[in-house]
Amino acid sequence: MSELIYRGGTILTIDPQHRVVTGDVACADGVIAQVGGAYTPRTDDYQIVDCAGMLVMPGLVQAHIHTCQTLARGRADDLELMDWLRGVIWPYEASLDEDAAGAAGELACAELLLGGTTAILDMATVHHTDAIFRAAERSGIRATIGKAMMDAPDPQVPVGLRETTSASLDESEKLIKRWHGTANDRLRYAYAPRFVLSCTDELLREVGVQSKAKRLRIHTHASENRGEIALVRQRFGKDNLDVFEDLGLLGDHVCIAHCVHLSAAERALLARTGTHVCHCPSSNLKLASGVCDVPALIAAGVSVAIGADGAPCNNNLDGFLELRLAALIHKHTSGPRTLPAPEVVRIATLGGAAALGLSGAIGSLEVGKRGDVIAIDLSPLHQIPSSSPWSVVAYAAKACDVRHVAVDGRLVVQDRTLLTLEVPKVRDRARRAAQRLFP
Ligand SMILES: [Zn+2]
């Protein structure tokens, strides 16, 4: 048995009572064995991490990320969605090769882990998804990844991203066999039809059927931008979520990013089917898409998570920044008590875990759950004097305050040093690959 002990911190459990306790968080063989009080190691194979003066909490879970896009950071600023996709992102994704995809994946995973994000739902591109899985595997992050599915005959999509329906399903099948449930179930697969406009009805229907038969997640985008919604109405004569329902793509195994422009009927449909929404406030603001009405979603009973989306539309993958923005952005319309600190911290942890279908395994510090645990330094001046730990996490803490990170009970960041990948190498590799793609 190997034990990891986060010793002597203030512990934000995110358990059903939202308890804040003090003492140790101990993991034995990857599983949380004790939360609070003093833990006595049961074997000689243990490691103690001093967390005095720190806040210990579950790692952030981001339910909408594109790690493959990280090399396009800063290359697609100040554009709206369809111009951003057609002008930069699709040509960029089409130009990725195996090495560049791996470089983007490593860069993203390194940034995410150092910033306290321990689990992601990640949409890769059409090809080279193995490289993304390998990067996640090496980095130690918990990742549910899917290749982007794009079989619609759209002349605006570069040739390199066009695929047939059967090729899209076959490649997904191979990736499921190779990766789903590997690394002690840390790596999982999710079907990732990009959005309805990128896919044929046949493909979407098949994804609906296969995801249920194989008990896999679906990760997609919808209702991000008014132009996109107009195109959906043109093709189907109805709104995004009605199309999803007709094609069998709603349910508690589905996570839809954005959902900025929804009717009350669409919100009710999400609630009725248990479909998860991932709120991406930075991305929605930067692409001038609008603001997802999270208070209305929550009031309707929809499960919400938070995500940074991709580096070219954010331009960071900083979960704390997203969390703070999610807490702030709804107050001017819905009032200052909207999304109070404990609620937004729950969304950024347990809400994300639910979107990944892993609320029984991660998202809170409870005995029996997997050991995805972070420790935040409480000494930086921008937090002093801190009173409520909820307030620190929601409003004051930054990604750079994260000191220690464990995934599955294994330390992957210690004293702000990534233990799994060499950061200078990750940086150099990413720069070289970006230079090749953007000469
Ligand atoms: Zn996205």
Image (spheres, helix red, strand yellow):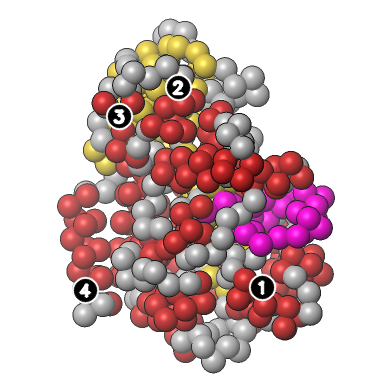
Q: Amino acid at mark 1?
A: Ile
Q: Whole-Å distance between the Cαs marked 4 and 1?
A: 35 Å
The response on whether ligand 1 sits within 8 Å of label 3 is no
In the shown orientation, is residue 406 left or right of residue 337? left
Pointer 4 residue: 435
Pointer 2 residue: 389
The response on whether ligand 1 sits within 8 Å of label 1 is no
Pointer 3 residue: 382
Q: Which residues are magenta?
A: 252-280
Pointer 1 residue: 229
Q: Amino acid at mark 4?
A: Gln
Q: Residue furthest bottom?
A: 155
Q: Identify whether 7 is placed above or below 330.
A: above
Q: Identify whether 337 is placed above or below 85.
A: above
Q: Whole-Å distance between the Cαs marked 1 and 2?
A: 40 Å
How many C-alpha atoms fall within 10 Å of the one at disc 1: few (<14), some, or many (≥20)?
Answer: some
Q: Amino acid at mark 2?
A: Pro
> How far across and down, in percent of the image, does residue 424 sit?
17, 52
SS class, disc 2: helix
